[in-house]
Amino acid sequence: MRCRLWVVLMLGFGYTGGIQTQTVADGSSPWSRVTLHLSQTSALAAIIDIGKVSHQPLGIVLGANASAFCASQQKVDIEDESALDAVARVVKPLKYSVATKQGVVVVEPDAIAQWLTAILEHRYDFPALTGLTITSLGTRLDGWMKMEVGHAPGYAASTHHAPNAQRFDLGAMMSASTEEIADRIVSLGPKAVWMMGPNTPNPKSALDMDIRVAPYDDPDALGSLNCGP
C-alpha cells in the first residue's frame, strides 16, 4: 500500500528497464566504475540503471526530442567504465551531452533552448523543509518553479511514496538556482534522479515543464518517470 500526500502551495514520465544480465559498481561518484549489460532498452531506462548500480545522483533535462529518450531501443554493453562516461555514451546518439555539477551527473540537450536555460538558472530563496520524502521535496520544487518562473497563482499536486519511505530535512537555500536545488535533493539519502520534461507537446515556458524526483530505492517512483505527452 502506498501513501498519497496532497501538497498545496499559494504565492504533478514511462520508465521501462531492459533485460539486465550483469551490474557491477564500485563506489558512488561520477568516476565510479560500472559494468552493465542491457538488451532492448530505452536511453532513459539505461541511464537510470547506471545511476542505480553506481549510486550516482542524476539530473536529466529533456529538450525538443524528448520522446527519443523513451522510444529509442538499444543494446547497452558497458564494461568497467565510469558512471559519467557510461551515461555520455548512452545519450550521445540523441544529441545530448553530460556534465558533472555539484557531484551530480546532469544530461542536457546539445542545443538547449534559451527559455529552458533561464528556468534552470532562475534563482530563488528556497525555504527550509522538514520531514519530507525525496519525492515530496521534488514536488515542492516543481511548484515553486511554476509560481516563481511561470507566475502561476497557486499550485496543487499529489505525491505518492512508499509507507516506509525515508524522510529528510532540507535546509533553506538562499539565491539558489532551480538546478542547484534539484541537485541538492537527489544527493540526499539513497540518492535519486531528477528529471525536467514537458507536460505538453510544444513546451515554451515553466508552466509547460514538470520536475519529478525519484529515489533509487523506490521502484514505483522510478516507474512513474516518462518522456512527456
Image: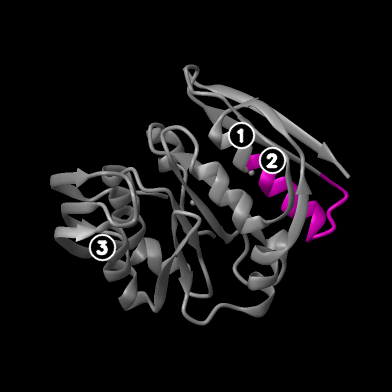
Residue 140's mark? 2
Residue that numbered label 1 is attached to: 136
Q: Specify the amino acid type for callout 1.
A: Ser
Looking at the image, residue 115 lies above or below residue 136: below
Residue that numbered label 3 is attached to: 86
Looking at the image, residue 20 lies above or below residue 1: below
Horizontal side of 140 relative to 192 (left or right) equals: right
Horizontal side of 5 relative to 128 (left or right) equals: left
Range drawn in magenta? 139-154
Element at label 1? helix
Q: Specify the amino acid type for callout 3.
A: Ala
Does the magenta run of residues contain 145?
Answer: yes
Q: Earlier in the sequence, mark 3 or mark 2?
A: 3
Residue 213, x across and y down, in percent: 53, 44
Element at label 2? helix
Residue 139, x across and y down, in percent: 64, 41
Tell me if mark 3 has few (under 14), some (14-19) or many (20+) residues whose alpha carbon lies within 10 angstroms of its own: many
Asked whether the residues under the numbered discs 3 and 2 touch, taking CB atoms below 8 Å apart as contact, a structural biologist would say no
